[in-house]
């Protein structure tokens, strides 16, 4: 297996999870770009049946207020 392209982090890995948790694990200044697909405060609940097993996955895209949504997103964007 070839060596890592970066001496700081393994760039061959896709880091999945809440981006706030994942970003806190990374060294400062090691990221050039992050793509996030955040909830968009649509005030809806979503359900999908995933894959061949039809596993039910769901999430709520509801926040108490616009301020609560901004308070949720701000630290993710800042970090």
Image (spheres, rainbow, N blue to C red):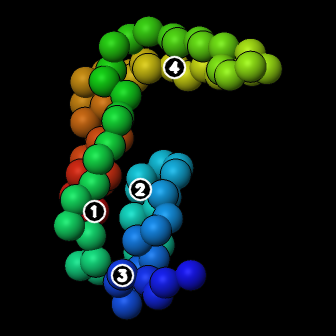
Q: Which mark is residue 79?
A: 1
Q: Residue at x 28, y 55 (%)?
A: 34
Q: Which mark is residue 20?
A: 2
Q: Secondary structure at mark 2?
A: helix
Q: Nearer the viewer, mark 2 or mark 3?
A: 3
Q: Is residue 75 left or right of residue 25?
A: left
Q: Nearer the viewer, residue 77 or 64?
A: 77
Residues at badges 3 and 4 in contact (C-beta under 8 Å)?
A: no
Q: Position of residue 24 (x, y in %)?
A: 42, 69
- Cα distance in 3D space between marks 3 and 1: 24 Å
- Cα distance in 3D space between marks 2 and 4: 18 Å
- Cα distance in 3D space between marks 3 and 4: 38 Å
The residue that mark 3 highlights is 5
Q: Residue at x 56, y 81 (%)?
A: 1
Q: Earlier in the sequence, mark 2 or mark 4?
A: 2
Q: Nearer the viewer, residue 70 or 32?
A: 32
């Amino acid at each position: 297996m070839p060596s890592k392209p970066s001496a700081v982090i393994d760039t061959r890995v896709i880091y999945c999870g809440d981006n706030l948790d994942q970003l806190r694990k990374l060294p400062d200044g090691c990221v050039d770009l992050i793509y996030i697909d955040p909830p968009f405060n649509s005030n809806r609940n979503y359900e999908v049946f995933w894959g061949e097993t039809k596993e039910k996955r769901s999430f709520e895209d509801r926040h108490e207020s616009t301020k609560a949504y901004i308070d949720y997103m701000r630290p993710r964007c800042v970090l």
